[in-house]
Amino acid sequence: MTKPVDRTVDGFSRYRIDFGYDGTDFAGFAKQPGLRTVQSELVKGLEVIFGKDNKDFGLRVAGRTDAGVHAQHQVVHVDLSPLQLKRIGRNPDIAGRVNTALPQDIRLFSFEKAPAGFDARYSASFRRYRYRIADHASNLDPLEVRYVLKLKVDLDLKLMRKAAKEMVGLHDFGAFCKPRAGATTIRNLRYIRITRNRKAGNIVEIELKGDAFCHNMVRSLTGALVAVARGRASVLDVKDRLKSANRAGSFKVLGGRGLSLIEVGYPKDSKLAEQAEKARKLRSLDEN
């Protein structure tokens, strides 16, 4: 077996950044002209510490979140030049230094030298999201308002779980994704767990874990589950839509407010580059 290629630019050193953000006031993660995004604010903060001689720092993110979506645990990598490394000095708390240059709704937890072969996006083996819904909105804790979708109808969790069973596994999720040119919509959804959090005002929590999620996939899947729970669609409708892989006439996409990226997972260091090469390949429904 050929050793996987380490794609770090020659002469540069790769660093892994773990961080979180309140997505309420962001127009998503990715840079967009004239809009406040997580990436644009993060790059500005990095430029304060490391200078502007490395455009965007070769930054790559584990999961691009949409407008209003939060992250309890997000990961990016950046590639730093020898000159930028000199600017770090002897202070080991790089995350703390960058935090002083960031707005309060972004916070770095760690800023560490990445192992060989690490790629924040392609080396990731799973992502875990949680969507939170208050179906008793009149009793919602005011401290939860920014992080929960409010509804005025009771959700039938038994029906939601039946529909969720149809979604789990390796499928073409084309009916639940906004397609991107040259990208596949085949994903392996490992589980969907639906619970009612009695300690947090009976908020319904939908947790999804998968190897990766395509654009709008989590909010589309949760939208379908809510439609079933409200009696506006059946479990069979979900099953048929999944088989069709056709987005036309699909379920309503829920808003970003209730959604958080809560974990990104990686294999052990010796498998990082191998996982990255595997993730770059075009997927098929014939995978084992």
Image: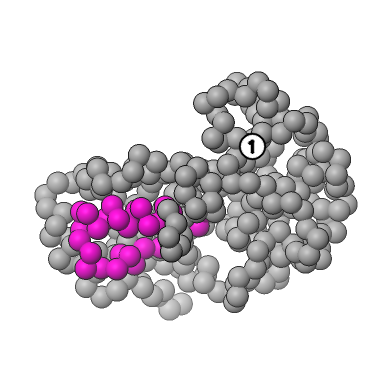
Q: Tell me residue 51's x, y (percent).
A: 20, 61
14 vs 4, nearest the viewer? 14
Residue type indicated by callout 1? Leu
| Vertical side of 201 occupied by 33: above or below | below
The answer to whether residue 138 of the structure is visible from this angle is: yes
Residue 274 shown left or right of residue 45 in the figure: right
Q: Tell me residue 222's x, y (percent).
A: 70, 46
Quadrant for the C terminus, please.
bottom right
Residue 28 shown left or right of residue 148 in the figure: left
Q: Seen from this angle, which residue lies furthest bottom?
A: 2
Rendered image quadrant of residue 249: bottom right
**Residue in the image at 60% along x and 70% along y:** 180
Q: Which residues are magenta?
A: 37-65
The residue under label 1 is 149
Q: Tell me residue 263's x, y (percent).
A: 49, 46
Q: How many marks?
A: 1
**Residue in the image at 50% along x and 57% along y:** 64
Circle 1 SS class: strand
**Residue in the image at 29% along x and 74% along y:** 9
Residue 24 shown left or right of residue 165 in the figure: left
| Vertical side of 174 occupied by 254: above or below | above
**Residue in the image at 86% along x and 53% along y:** 237
Magenta span contains residue 270: no
Q: Tell me residue 173's x, y (percent).
A: 71, 62
256 vs 211, nearest the viewer? 256
Magenta span contains residue 45: yes
